Amino acid sequence: MNEASILERLEKDILVLTINRPSRMNALSESVRIGLTGALEAAARRDDVAGVVLTGAGPRAFSAGQDLDEAQAFSAETIGGHFRRLGRLYDAIRSLPKPVGVALNGVAAGFGLQASLYADIRVAHAGVTMSQPEVRAGIPSVMGLWVIAENIGLPRAVDLSLTCRAVPAEELLRWNAIDAIVAPEDVLGETVARVRALAAKPKKAFAASKMNLARLTQAGFEETIEAAVRIQGEAFRTGEPQAVAAAFMAAREARKR
Amino acid sequence: MAVLSERMEEIQVVTLDRPAALNAVDAELRDGLVAALAAAEADPEVKAIIFTGAGGRAFSAGQDLQVSMSLDATTAPAWFHGLHEFYQSIRRLSKPAVAAIDGVAAGAGFQAALWCDLRVGTAKTRMGQPEVAAGMASAIGVVPMLRALGLSRTLALSLTSELLDATTCLEAGLLNEITEPDRLMERAAAAARRMTAMPPVAFSLTKRRIAEITQSAFDEAIEAAAGFAAQSYATGEPQAAAAAFLARKGRA
Amino acid sequence: MTGFRKDLQEGQLWLTLDRPAKLNAIGPDTRRGLTEALEAARDDAGVRVVVLTGAGKRAFTAGQDLAEMTDLDADGGARWVRELAALYDAIRALDKPSLVAINGYASGAGLQMALHADYRIAAPHARFGQPEIDAGMPSVLGPWVMRAAMGLAATRDMALTGRFLGAETARRLGAVDHIAAAGRLAEEARERAANLAKAPPLAVKLTKQRMRRLTEDDWRATVAHGEGLARTAFAAGEPQATARAFLAARAAARS
């Protein structure tokens, strides 16, 4: 029986959404994407929800990025649709007129990093790292490049996208890429508290302010999705991403034997 | 030769080599760099490029003063169009590009470094955009500066013509790392090798996208700069600034 | 004078917000007066550099005067945004350098004036914030210039939480260019202004005009959006009620 890939619970008025695939480092799968998108879009309409917190199950990862088994099925014909649907999930985060926080219980890589940067609040513990490892997986960094550049400048976006390095929490804090570093057991509670504090602000002013930020970045966000569709299609037509994915899977199989 | 180009294993080290002039950009250096980069890009054995400046005092102090003094309202625009190819030769590289900056990177030198993927410096590194002090509008440099520093700091740096010290550069994201001078090439190579390990198609498509983000702003900035240069040179501001600088140096 | 002083010396025009008992808060007269003074400075050949600062040690300015908010209607709210935009436009429109010496709190309009200017020098105890949200005001004009200066993460943080940053953090994030030594803000500002005044004027003008042109369309769209949002917010009554509650709580705390 398949366990639900997204767990939902209400902590009073704060909806906590947990990516629930700890044995896969909470990798982004279709069911995660559909579950998160649906829950976020519904949260906008729910009167019992004043704010949302995203987190990951287990101690290792918020999300380590794209599920590699599912990525095996990507092709030049289907990759564009995949990025458009991913864009819709990111849009659900950035456009929710209520506060969204990410409780970084562990590694945030690729999708994990990007989802975090679309949120309003990010709390981590000292062992958390963020990375943008797409290029190492043979996937050009387009959407990640944009959201990192928007938040903390183009040079850092170039650094993360081209070196794929894991940035430690302390450096992320200096960059204002995360808001606070607390003990691992306090990450969720602190995130919920901060989201609740935002939810206590005058509601119309909060929603209008957040929507204004979305407006300021709207043209860039849309252009980036289109660029991702175009460039990922080009990459997949060369066969490199598929070859890199296959090599990784083969290595993983070899390690199991 | 104003530009040296030597292979260090799989890395091409391109050195701006006019140390007596703090590696300032004149026509020979400009053309030398364009040629060296075209060769490095075309050579399949070259996996990355490291830029550096000879002499231990500067990466490059920017536009050569003799050039500034020799231009006038009719010749200045052509110089700026020539700079388009200078910067574009860095921007269009599909291979990793690291700037190793021991000393001043100012004006055209600052911009050349900013178009690289990563920048490693030393405690002596200072970076800035002194065009205005030289009587020139800061138009081309603001393209990468706005992306790195934001509007307010770009104006502050452009109008004060000040040079930021190494620590400030690191905090602001203009430098990725500060190291000892005798470890500079080693650390630049390590930075380059993090990138040479990447799948080449994904890497080069990402680099192409990075350049694409600023392409139209960059192209337009060159045109604007050429127009401003004609205006500025017609007033004599740049020539006067260059002459004053040279007089202060006792080399007029 | 209408809440500020003008001093012209050696080409430096110092505009000092001067209601220290009210943290140099900016009411309608000050707003309009400052805008006129900046517009006049633009064409005054005797002015080579403009310096904005605040009287006293506590605040550059705490921003808009909350008392003004309590009785505005939808039209009044829209006009208030337009007048603030006109003030920032007057800073943007200067072809000569501008410098803000931040002697304490730079809040709301204070933060924004500083970011629209060319150079920001802060006292070590200066604090920077965009607390409009806590006054029930949607934050629109501020985030435009904050994002331009500091990027999205810092902007979202400040605009949504309303929190204040110290001078060192503000400097690291791109909102401050230099922190003066304690007690030396005015001196260092004067020196810096003198240096700015010496920069070749045509080079300065061309640089500033270009930056203005590059950002003008986006800024105008934001001003229009801000006016519309203020109209909606004030029609719904949230800012007026929040301002009244804030002023009442403050009065109660003092009695």
Image (spheres, rainbow, N blue to C red):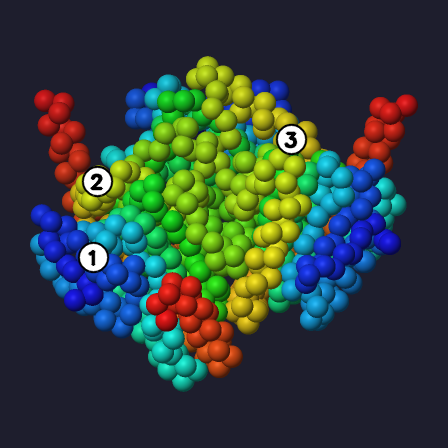
List the residue tagged with mark 1: B15
What chain does mark 1 sit on? B
List the residue tagged with mark 3: A199
Q: Which x, y percent locates residue C96?
A: 62, 65
Q: Quadrant of residue B88?
A: bottom left
Q: Residues within 10 Å of mark 3 (few under 14, many from 20)?
A: many
Q: CA distance from mark 3 to mark 2?
A: 53 Å
Q: Which residue appears at 37% of the width and 38% of the height?
A: A111
Relative height, residue C204 to residue A183 (above, below)? below
Mark 2 or mark 1: which comes first in sequence?
Answer: 1
Q: Residues within 10 Å of mark 2 (few under 14, many from 20)?
A: few
- Secondary structure under badge 1? strand
Q: CA distance from mark 2 to mark 1?
A: 16 Å
Q: CA distance from mark 3 to mark 1?
A: 56 Å
Q: Which x, y percent locates residue C111?
A: 65, 45
Looking at the image, is mark 3 or mark 1 nearer the viewer?
A: 1
Q: Residues within 10 Å of mark 1 (few under 14, many from 20)?
A: many
Nearer to the camera, B67 or B177: B67
